[in-house]
Image: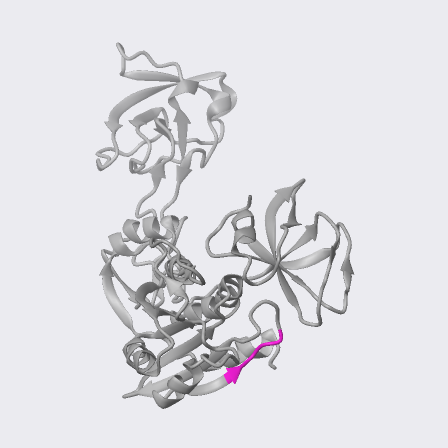
Amino acid sequence: MLSVFDALAMILQNVQGTDSESIPLSQGFSRILANNLTVPYDSPQFDKALMDGFAIQANEGICDLSVVTFQVIETITAGKTPAHPVADGVASRIMTGAPLPVGSNCVVPIEQCYFDESSPETVDIPADSIRQEANLMRRGTAARAGSTLLNAGSRLQPQQIAALAEFGFGTIEVRRQPRVAVMATGDELIPFDEPLQGGQIRNSNEPMLLAQIEACGAVPISLGIVRDNESQLRTAILSGLQYDVLLLTGGVSAGILDLVPKQLKLAGVEQRFHGVHMKPGKPLWFGCREDNQKRCLVFGLPGNPVSSLACFELFVRPALEELVGARSRKMSMVASLTESIRVKGNRPTYQPVAISMLDGRLIAQPVPWSGSSDLRATVDANGMALLQPEKGNYQENDIVEIWLWGDQRLI
């Protein structure tokens, strides 16, 4: 069996990126930018005031007096062009964001001035409030025309949306969101909103995977439950292969009704590997199908829900990020264990944990867990920790590698 590292490397080698599309900026949140963008003009485009107050010319010797009286020649509001320059003894009243008048090199906040609204012709300014280049921003200080604004592969967050709006990018080129189909297989499955009969289990994998796909910024597509019937499997698989990625859960182990690998082969899907040295998730299957220069990535996920959850985060999520050319992938972190725990078996184990912050460091609290079918344990977790079999017994405060699931936050 492949190691987790080698399995992921093989998956990423088979990824072909999605094409691009043009969308309104208003729809750009969390989308992946398709091309490099440069600043179209200096920001700010003019010297501007950063405070409400008075724009003056601060010259050497002006501070010899304790208070200096200035003649107020105009009021400049945001959006208005100054009509007069300032010089010695002359000031312009100015509002935050307004263009500075020619000759000014200082803005004194109004609360530091002695100004009478009933007699607005003059203002008295304490000398210790007059400092060159105070409370103003010169043209191009934030960004110069032609400089880099955002690089291709950036995932657009609110602050980047705001910057694009500031510079007038009404439409943007982004990578097309991968369409990911999900199919749950098994005669024992029933929809989650139906009553159970003897031997049946509710379909929990499909809604879990659809949510994980959505958390990745991809488009989830439900193919529903498919029975352990070769004809039904063949039809459903051919339908699922029309998408960028096909996820199947169940039917990839070694049971007498594990029919998925055979039907995938008949549908033209080439197997890349089957089995990964890990727990849970050992039966993971991966392959590709080429059709008219279109490639579909196919993951046969184990039927046990915690196995599916772990395999998605370790393998499917990075593949989806690669498909859209994301510059920064979700990475693992390290945390301190809050208690001792023993590794069972000879495979690297991805133990559900509750990850939180304590005294400025990440900590991981193992949750009671009975194995790959114990979905209840994951309710109290928000991620997983890697426990290596050669370590044997982990002690409190031992450092482990951790992953947060999906877009979950610290507990």
Please give the name of the residue rendered at 33% of the width and 63% of the height, measured from the top-left corner.
220
| Quadrant position of the N terminus in the picture | bottom right
The reply to whether the magenta stretch includes residue 119 is no
Please give the name of the residue rendered at 62% of the width and 55% of the height, measured from the top-left corner.
369
Q: Where is residue 400 in the image (x, y as percent from the top left)?
A: 68, 58
- Residue 346 falls in which quadrant of the image? bottom right
| Quadrant position of the C terminus in the picture | top right
Relative placement, left or right, of 348 versus 57 is right
Q: Please give the count of numbered marks on the rendered protein.
A: 0
Nearer the observer, 58 or 350? 350
The reply to whether the magenta stretch includes residue 276 is yes
Determine if residue 352 is in view.
yes
Nearer the observer, 128 or 89? 128
Specify the segment rendered in magenta. Answer: 273-277
Chief secondary structure of the magenta span?
Answer: loop
Q: Position of residue 230 (x, y in %)?
A: 35, 83
Please give the name of the residue rendered at 29% of the width and 71% of the height, measured from the top-left corner.
20
